Amino acid sequence: MRIAVFSDNFYPELSGIADSILSLGEHLAARGHCIRFYAPRYARKDFALLGLPVAEIHPRDTIGVVRLPSIPYPTGTMQGRMVFPTGLRWRHLRGFRPDVIHVHLPFGVGLEGLMAARALGTPLVGTNHTPVTEFLRYAPIRAAWCGRLAAQYTAWFYSHCDFVSSPSGTIFAEMENFRFRGRHRVISNPIRLDAFGPLPHRQLLKATFGFSDFTILYAGRLAPEKRVDLLVRAIAGLVSEVPAVRLALLGRGSAEGALKSLCRSLRVAERVKFLGFLPNSTTVAEVYNAADVFAIASTAETQSIATMQAMACGLPVVGVRAWGLGEYINGMNGLLVDPGDVPALKQALAYLATHPQARTQLGQGGQKFVTRFSAPAIASEWEEIYQTVAADFHHHLNATGMLPGRDRSGTDVPFRGRTIALRIAQESDDALEFCDSRIQ
């Protein structure tokens, strides 16, 4: 199949979304499918922030990347980009002739994907990775009505898809509150079990990274919504009870400076190690294996790839009952506490510090749990979904001349998109090039 993937978040941005999209594309390409990514064009500083060379990522000949001009947008990664949709970029797709278009976020690039699907008469698949209301801290307006509007827009956007996935069932519950009624299913992001798993010589790895006998690890971007500050506060309260406790933070982000200041103010700066960004997955897996517990206090996760990677490496996890974390962390692989509850977080970490057998049991439970989410298994699931959605779409279109259920009520609508789009292109042939030249 020929699959066009539209995402507002992609390499080199530090994000589980970007990692999972690329991983899925690589596995589908390995099966003979042709993948073309449409994503923002990132600046040199976005590569430099993570110590990456300024180069396109081309893992396979059957994978192509089309970069769309963008402008910086403030996010927790400090790499966020905004693409202004023109409604004409579907012309890039005419030669590719996609069998299906997959949109991963509902913003500028996602809108381009939606309009391209309508213009070309192509089935549209969507994935909602994000509890959008949790990210209003980055919006210019943060009033309650803005949150409702964002949720309504998200439901509207995904209502135009022929199939919608999310790693979290709570995402669908939120969208259904705003009249989303589309065909949907919970599907995990792919986990690279070939790269993440238990390693020997843990003590040697501890020495390599300077970890103590009880080191708690967090991996991911250091952003306000990740609530890494709660982990620092829990560590500060745990020192007298567990003198060996240390916290390792793997990642970069906009909250890094504030977190370092907090460590100094709580007098735990020597106990918190900022590891920065490690681009090599082998080294990241070694960091996981050198730690004793993985902890995450974020209230903005639909799944958390880092948490799944920690489980794959045999680490017990401590997380919060918020969005997708409560769906993936259970009594077999970790402990859950309420969001924002520092005393409960401290208590859970203290329990694991003093009960090594519980750490071993939960770690083994996590390893067993994540096997169902391996990248090959998830690629097989998507392969079947793409084929089914495409077949159903074209059967319906050929039988009725109507696009299947692409309005908010689920009612079929006449297929006039191709005619309208062609007319626009003919009347303003240089519109796309003009817009692209102005948006840098």
Image (cartoon, rainbow, N blue to C red):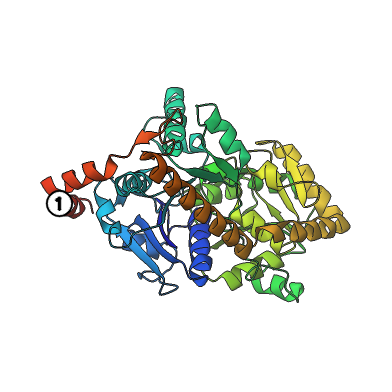
Q: Which residue is mark 1?
A: 434
Residue 179 appears left or right of 58: right
Q: Quadrant of residue 139?
A: top left
Nearer to me, 411 or 310: 411
Residue 283 position, x and y percent, is 60, 72
Q: Quadrant of residue 44?
A: bottom left
Nearer to me, 373 or 392: 392
Q: Is residue 320 above or below residue 16?
A: above
Residue 257 appears left or right of 379: left
Residue 122 visible within the image = yes
For the point 48% across and 71% down, the residue is 32
Nearer to me, 4 or 104: 4
For the point 62% across and 39% down, the residue is 169
Residue 71 appears left or right of 136: left
Residue 171 position, x and y percent, is 57, 38
Residue 35 position, x and y percent, is 42, 64
Q: Is residue 33 above or below residue 430?
A: below
Residue 348 position, x and y percent, is 78, 45
For the point 80% across and 60% down, the residue is 364
Residue at the front extreme, as displayed? 399
For the point 51% across and 36% down, the residue is 182
Residue 323 visible within the image = no
Residue 412 appears left or right of 214: left
Tell me the quadrant of the picture where the C terminus can be found: bottom left
Q: How many marks?
A: 1
Residue at the top extreme, as displayed? 145
Q: Given the image, on which type of amino acid does mark 1 rest?
A: Phe
Nearer to me, 233 or 408: 408
Q: Residues within 10 Å of mark 1 (few under 14, many from 20)?
A: few
Tell me the quadrant of the picture where the N terminus can be found: bottom left
SS class, disc 1:
helix
